[in-house]
Amino acid sequence: MRIAVVGRGLIGSAAARHLTLMGHEVTLIGPSEPTEFATHNGPFGSHYDEGRITRGLDPYPFWSRVSLASISRYRDIEAASGVPFFNEVGAMMSGPADSDYVHSLETVMAGNGVMAERFDGAEIAARFPYFQFPDDTRAYYQPKEAGHISPRNLVRAQGIAATRGGAQIIDAEVLDVRDGVTGAVIKLAGQTLRFDRAIVAAGGFTNKLMDDALPLTVYARTVAMFRVTDAEAARLAWMPSLIHVYPTGEDPYLLPAIKYPDGHHYLKIGGDRVDIELTNDEDMRDWFRSGGSVEVGEMLTDMIRDRMPDLAIQEVVVKPCVTTFTPHNHPIIDMLGNHIAVAVAGCGRGAKNSDELGRLAAEAVMGRTDPDTRVPV
Ligand SMILES: Cc1cc2nc3c(=O)[nH]c(=O)nc-3n(C[C@H](O)[C@H](O)[C@H](O)COP(=O)(O)OP(=O)(O)OC[C@H]3O[C@@H](n4cnc5c(N)ncnc54)[C@H](O)[C@@H]3O)c2cc1C
């Protein structure tokens, strides 16, 4: 079958690879990362970064399941593409010992067979001396098959593996997608392409292409990046990725020192306290062009000083991003018409498991939708 995938992000490029493995003739369409956010007029993606936390640990069974499935294929994707993207430094999740959050983690760990070590109170700082936690904290540390991935390199790896499997790549914005009588009709500037079927995986910009048919909420997000010296990065060499849940329910995430394309190491923290909803395409583009919120950056700086009081920070940089959510807190990966499927909504956690979400999209466009990812009614 001739199948188009719209969106060369994490889920779209994974879907393209899986479709080639299934023997289809695949065309992957979408723009590359913009070189300059402030002057870019096309759509943006949520993967323009070097660090995303990856872990099987999760308080939600669905997200743990799809993450475990993806993580088990990371090394195969690296081998198929020649692009390394996984740094197995481990991941930790923590919160008040007697909280629903920690209890849910424990239930999912037991149900999905996630291997993690438990630390309580002062034991955490004894094992991870750069962290400070409240006394009532319980932490689970997953040392293997967890850590962080480079979302940029994962997208690159999936694209290379898909191309090696026969996929064509078109570096262009899609202007319109229609469910035609005999197939999917895709409009680019200056040309119209026809396919037997199509998957739309355009992240926060998906609803624009689907005439706002999906119950998606897109939020503006700011991350703060903390530049540290190479010596400080070396001191933190085996620091795991961390998500700590406060009694208020806030759950900022923290990535260890990662080397960025400018040659410097940065730690990164995210987890806005205020949700700013972006209701249309132009708001989203404006948000990316704005560079992010300085106020949120200051709140995040307070959070990292609270968690890592000894961290020697050289500079703080803020960056914008968006996250897409659904009412059921699962992605929507389902047919929307006779020839078009959508694969959207990482719910703030769709990088680590994007390979499995892409595989589910390849199944859905063949009419085999996973019951957990249907459009909610
Ligand atoms: C700050 C931040 C931190 C995060 N941290 C984590 C984390 O630690 N762990 C984790 O697992 N997840 C994390 N996530 C979530 C994860 O990055 C997203 O869930 C993931 O990027 C979603 O993948 P996607 O393919 O749906 O969208 P994207 O990665 O955004 O890709 C969508 C693609 O569609 C393209 N596109 C849009 N419109 C069009 C069009 N009209 N025509 C053609 N192409 C189009 C875009 O250019 C883009 O390339 C984080 C997200 C953010 C914002």
Image: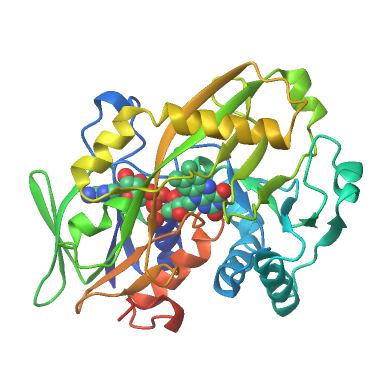
Where is the C terminus found, in terms of image quarters?
bottom left
Q: How is the image coloured?
A: rainbow
The residue under the point 65% across, 50% down is 243
The residue under the point 64% across, 55% down is 247
Q: Position of residue 18 (x, y in %)?
A: 45, 66
Task: Say whether residue 316 is visible.
Answer: yes
The residue under the point 43% across, 83% down is 371
Where is the N terminus found, in terms of image quarters?
bottom left
For this view, does 333 lie left or right of residue 308? Answer: left
Q: Position of residue 59 (x, y in %)?
A: 63, 67
Residue 36: quadrant of the picture:
top left
For this view, does 308 lie left or right of residue 295? Answer: right
Q: Position of residue 159 (x, y in %)?
A: 44, 49
The residue under the point 81% across, 34% down is 130
Relative height, residue 80 to residue 110 (above, below):
above
Total marks placed: 0
Relative height, residue 344 to residue 294 (above, below):
below
Residue 185: quadrant of the picture:
bottom left
Residue sitting nearer the eye, 104 or 38:
104
Relative height, residue 187 to residue 36 (above, below):
below
Residue sitting nearer the eye, 241 or 202:
241
Task: Say whether residue 203 is visible.
Answer: no
Residue sitting nearer the eye, 36 or 64:
64
